[in-house]
Structure formats: C-alpha cells, structure tokens
Image (cartoon, rainbow, N blue to C red):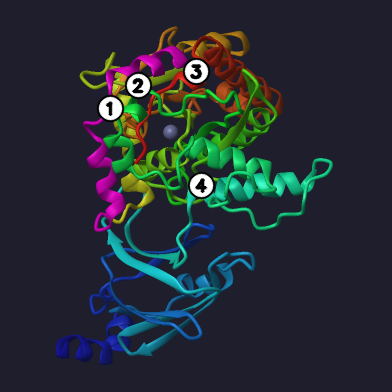
Amino acid sequence: MKRRALLVQSGSLVLSLGLPELSWGATIVNVRIWPAPEYSRVTIESDAALSAKQLFVANPPRLAVDIEGIRLNPALKELVAKVKADDPNIAGIRVGQFTPTTVRLVIDLKQPIRPQVFTLAPVAAYQHRLVLDLYPEQEADPLEALIADQVREQKAAPPAGSSNSSNATATAPPGSADPLADLIAQKLMPGKPFPLSSATAASSANDAEDPRANSSGTERLIIIALDPGHGGEDPGAIGPAGTREKDVVLRLAHLLRDRINNSAVHGNTMRAYLTRDADFFVPLGVRVQKARRVQADLFVSLHADAFFTPDPQGASVFALSQGAASSSAARWMAARENKADQIGGLNVKTKDATVQRALLDMSTTAQINDSLQLGSTLLGEIRRVGKLHKGRVEQAGFAVLKAPDIPSVLVEAAFISNPSEEIKLNSETYQNQLADALMRGILAYFARNPPLARVRATS
Ligand SMILES: [Zn+2]
C-alpha cells in the first residue's frame, strides 16, 4: 500500500518520461449498463483485474462501490450518462476520485436491492470485468410476470361484463372475478391448494398417475416457454454485416408470442412465456428454472448461430442427448451455446450457478422422445419456408434443454454467418414466415400429443 502511494505521488513524473503506467493496477476500457426489471447490471471492463468494496445504504437506497488502484478516466465517466431514465432499478450514477488511489461509484436506486458484486476473468472479446448486478429485493416471480401480462392484455380488451379486478395475482382464488388468473391458478393446482409443493406432488401416488386430469372438462392454459438465446453482455453470434443474434432471436420470439397468444389447442387457451423479454443476460440454468416455474408445456429456445466459415446455411433443430452427440457438428454447436454463461457473465458464487449442475442428470428418456417429435414437426414446417441444414433433429448436450419434464428443443433459425441468411434473418417477411412455420409446428405437435395427458412433477 505504501509502495503504491509512493508511486502515485511520482505518477506525473513517470508519465512525463513516457514510461508505461506501472503505478496503476488497471485502466478502465469500457462501461456498460443492462437495465431489466429482473435486475440491472453495471459492467466495468478493464485491462487488469479490479478489486472493489461495496456498501449498500438503505435510506435512500444507494450502493457505494470503491474500486481500488484506478484513476477516474473518461471511459468510467461515461457511466453517468449511460443510465436510462426508464431503468427499473437505477436512478442515477455518480463517480469521483475518492482517494488518490480509489474511485468511488455511487449508484442511486429506485428501490431496495440485493447487490451482487463480482469479477470475471477475460473471455471471448472481453477483458477483465467487474460486474455489479442489482436485483430488486422483491424478487421477480416468472409466474407473477406471466399473470401480470395476462391482466395487462385483458385490460387492453376487457371482455363484456368483466369486473375491473386490477390486482389479480398468483394467489387469486379459483372463482375470483379474473378468468385468466383462474386459468393459471387452475393450471398450477388442479384441485389443490396453491402452491403445490414438490413434496406433495411426489408423495401422492394419485398425482403421479393423474396430475392434472381434466375430469371437470374445464379449460386449461397451455404455456409455451420461448427462450430467445443470449442477451446483455452475450451478443451471441454476429453476422458479417453486424447483425447480432441476440436481437434477431428476441424479435422472432415476439412474433411467435403474438401467434401463440392468439391460438388455442383442443379448446385450450395458449400463452407464451418469454424467459427474457429485454436485452439482458439470463443464465442457462435460470432459463430452465423459469420454464419449470410456469410449468411450461413446451420449451423452444431460439437461436441463429455462426459457423467459422461463411458457407453453412439452413435451419437446424436440436434436442438433448444424454450420451454422445448425434454428430460432431451438433457437439460443436452445443459447446458453443453452453459457453453463453461465461460470456454473459454468470456469478459462479450464487445458487443460480448450481441450478444447472443439479439438473444435469435428471432428464428423462420420455422428455427426449417428446422433444424429438416436437423437433421433427418443427423441421417439417420450417422446410416449407426456408432451407434446412439437416433434415432430421440433431442431439447434443445443450444445457438449456435440460428441463427433465418439459419437451425442449433448440431452433437454429439460420446461420447468421452466411451473408445471404443474415439478410433473410433481418427481413420482416422471412421473420413472419418463420414465426408462422414454428406456430404451425407447435400446433401440429399438440394435435398428435394432446397436452392434457402429460404427467409432470412440480418443483
Ligand atoms: Zn445462439
């Protein structure tokens, strides 16, 4: 410490001699902010590892972070202007040189948060990253988000005679004035009090045989989890003209969501649930966890990846493999997708990081068989609007397909690395055709596999 202070004092001399800035631990090279309702992230990228101490002050809510061994520079000052007015969590950021060797960042917050401050070693195009993840203290529940969506839609077009129940939540009792909330409640607790614990589900033999038998003949909500790949720090693949995979797949997810929300299968209303509906990083294990939380009937992960040469083209559909991959290309693709957590920036010290490992060996043969069926139905429809890379569903160990109880596929819509496919991916016409094809595939799957017969344990 003393040595550093000495060097600091002589810093101007060192600089004037044109010597490298050895006195400083790191230089900030870039800053980024990723706002989202689930959490807002501040990333500070530097050419050497940073060390930081944080202090959360509850009233008014703010987070002070002292970063040691750096000087305030223009790159770091950019943080102040990068805060968006509609950031759900961050009200503003102030930065200043707190001591000669410490920069203090004060993040003013819109609500109380649980901060996670951690560092990431260099990976892909990134140098060292110091990450400040700001999670609202009131944790977002995927199920409540889904219901809030319903309520919003319902308000936009209120059915005749509906009450203005503005506060429907997951705990809305059956028989309340909100039919959509009822549907969801019913989906989650066919004849059972909410919430149905995993212990209850596992201990009841009847549940195992007949978990959501629809003996009453009432409507059940069919939920399709759509999983736009990548996001936030992880752009996914980038096309030769600069198109980012994370943007293309979110757009495709929105188009497919519109179609799903206007569809029904065997008289059952369908609803889409997006594992990410903004440009932020969602760990692979959390994507699976979210789909299970809403008890999705299907999980469709959307991608548009690159190959290391520009030639490959056409769409592919993948299912999980519990053993070897079906081809070396499939294995390569899975390894590439599974890297998303490293690039996106997973905090390995949190429980999120363990979720994936816990799910690792739980997948069942039945899930994979259903996924293969879903995959080939989707391929059959995609074939009608575009080229296929492989005519059959490929299999490999994709981490995001590991929900043990939800048929799960990963759709590579096209190769973004192929210049003509990149153009197609950006074309509104092709996006709509693709969304139509996926919708037809989903409906065709349900036509052959009625959703009501599905057996599932909750968790
Ligand atoms: Zn991808």
Cα distance between the residues tagged 1 and 4: 23 Å
Which is more N-terminal, label 2 or label 3?
3
Q: Is residue 358 above or below residue 45?
A: above
Q: According to the image, label 1 marks what residue?
A: 363
Q: Residue 384 appears at what percent x and percent y? A: 61, 8
Q: Residue 309 appears at what percent x and percent y? A: 40, 23
User: Which residue does the image show at 28% across and 45% down from the upper left?
Assistant: 355
Q: Are marks 2 and 1 in contact (CB under 8 Å)?
A: yes
Quadrant position of the C terminus in the picture: top left
User: Which residue does the image show at 30% across and 64% down from the upper left?
Assistant: 118
256 and 193: which one is in front?
193
Is 357 in the magenta? yes
Establish whether ligand 1 lies closer than 8 Å to the Cβ of label 2. Answer: no
Bin the neighbour count of mark 4 within 10 Å (Cα to Cα): few under 14, some 14-19, many 20 and up: many
**Residue extent of the magenta highlight:** 348-375
Q: According to the image, label 2 marks what residue?
A: 367
Q: Are marks 1 and 3 in contact (CB under 8 Å)?
A: no
Secondary structure of residue under mark 1 = loop
Q: Residue 127 appears at what percent x and percent y? A: 32, 56
Is 170 in the magenta? no
Query: Which amino acid lies under the numbered mark 2 shown in the image of this protein?
Result: Gln
Ligand 1's quadrant is top left
Cα distance between the residues tagged 1 and 3: 25 Å
